[in-house]
Image (tube, rainbow, N blue to C red):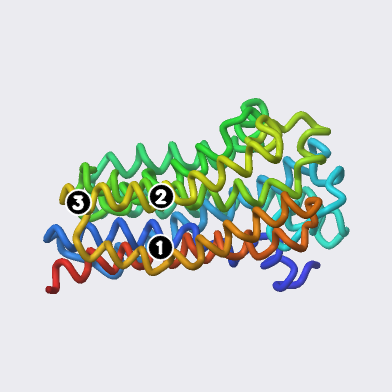
């Protein structure tokens, strides 16, 4: 029997920040607009989305194993290449699959509870859409992440879907502000996946997994990564100026040093012979950028109501 530590590795628990940030943001926007906040609603929303995320992580490990993708990967890093628990013989593949299904059932139960409490059908629509995208990201017959949609769908799920879904828990609807505020958060989590795909290039290409890095090639893909990294700030600035984001959202510019660090490290990786050790600071910085940017954006809505 695998240990809890091994299961924690399989589930990739540190990446749950991708779940926490959009749930917090959607809840903060709803509270800023005057909808009453409920800790129980927040907790069940966070748990439900986390269950779906964990189910997705485990399903990805299982189906990437079945496709031979993770076996073909000879350059795994702490940020890419799967959890490796199947490849290292720590957990049986069927156990990973079965626990994945369990987490999806738990996510469905959380969604059903939220619907029972609120009667907001939009929660069911968003929840089912997110769950299906998560499962079929690597599962056949769709295998969405193998067909050039991976980064976009990751950004949509952990941006607009979760932010607007969390907002709708309190409001019963979605609105323009929750959509627009979700875009930079979605972009950044998409870039987390994007920059983590560079070490997987050879393995992904060998099994026909068409990630953005495979489709564009490493140099072109890195240029697009750099452009999108800083476009996130331009997007935020535009919507602050036109009044669709609160003035306190200027706080997100405190994260620019992280973006610059990610830019410099990733550029060094391309220029110095694609040494994976040079890329690791970019991987870590992009994750921290998503977390800090999202939390500061959430804080801006809280401050806007308080002050």
Q: Earlier in the sequence, mark 1 or mark 2?
A: 2
Q: Are marks 3 and 1 in contact (CB under 8 Å)?
A: no
Q: Earlier in the sequence, mark 2 or mark 3?
A: 2
Q: Are marks 1 and 2 in contact (CB under 8 Å)?
A: yes
In the rendered structure, the answer to whether residue 71 lies left or right of residue 102 reads right
Residue 225: horizontal and vertical position, in percent? 56, 45
Q: Nearer the viewer, mark 3 or mark 1?
A: 3
Q: Are marks 2 and 3 in contact (CB under 8 Å)?
A: no
What residue is shown at x 63% (from left), y 35% (from top)? 212
Q: Nearer the viewer, mark 1 or mark 2?
A: 2
Mark seen at residue 293: 1
Camera-nearest residue between 103 and 306: 306
Report which quarter residue 89 is drawn in: bottom right
Residue 54: horizontal and vertical position, in percent? 58, 56
Separation of residues labelled 3 and 1 (CA atoms): 18 Å
Q: Is residue 265 above or below residue 136?
A: below
Q: Is residue 46 above or below residue 149?
A: below
Camera-nearest residue between 138 and 228: 228
SS at badge 1? helix
Residue 123: horizontal and vertical position, in percent? 32, 44
Few, some or many C-alpha atoms within 10 Å of disc 3 (few <14, some 14-19, many ≥20)?
A: few
Mark seen at residue 197: none
SS at badge 3? helix
Residue beneath disc 3: 241
Residue beneath disc 2: 232
In the rendered structure, the answer to whether residue 93 lies left or right of residue 220 reads right
Q: Earlier in the sequence, mark 3 or mark 1?
A: 3
């Amino acid at each position: 029997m695998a240990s809890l530590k091994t299961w924690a590795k399989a589930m990739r628990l540190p990446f749950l920040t991708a779940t926490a940030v959009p749930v917090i943001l959607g809840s903060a926007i709803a509270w800023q607009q005057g909808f009453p906040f409920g800790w129980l609603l927040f907790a069940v929303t966070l748990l439900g989305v986390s269950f779906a995320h964990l189910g997705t992580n485990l399903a990805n490990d299982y189906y990437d194993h079945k496709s031979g993708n993770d076996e073909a990967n000879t350059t795994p890093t702490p940020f890419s290449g799967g959890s490796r628990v199947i490849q290292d013989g720590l957990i049986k593949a069927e156990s990973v699959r079965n626990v994945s299904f369990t987490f999806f059932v738990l996510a469905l139960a959380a969604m059903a509870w939220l619907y029972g409490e609120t009667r907001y059908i939009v929660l069911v629509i968003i929840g089912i859409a997110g769950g299906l995208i998560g499962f079929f990201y690597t599962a056949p017959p769709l295998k969405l992440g193998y067909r050039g949609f991976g980064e976009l769908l990751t950004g949509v799920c952990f941006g607009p879907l979760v932010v607007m879904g969390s907002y709708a828990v309190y409001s019963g609807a979605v609105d323009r502000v929750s959509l627009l505020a979700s875009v930079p958060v979605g972009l950044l989590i998409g870039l987390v996946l994007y920059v983590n795909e560079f070490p997987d290039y050879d393995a992904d290409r060998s099994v026909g997994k068409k990630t953005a890095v495979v489709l564009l090639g490493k140099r072109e893909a890195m240029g697009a990564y750099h452009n999108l990294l800083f476009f996130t700030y331009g997007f935020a600035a535009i919507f602050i100026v036109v009044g669709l984001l609160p003035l306190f959202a200027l706080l997100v510019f405190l994260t620019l040093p992280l973006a610059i660090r990610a830019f410099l490290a990733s550029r060094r990786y391309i220029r110095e012979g694609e040494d994976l050790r040079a890329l690791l600071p970019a991987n870590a910085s992009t994750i921290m950028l998503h977390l800090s940017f999202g939390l500061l954006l959430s804080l801006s809505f809280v401050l806007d109501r308080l002050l």
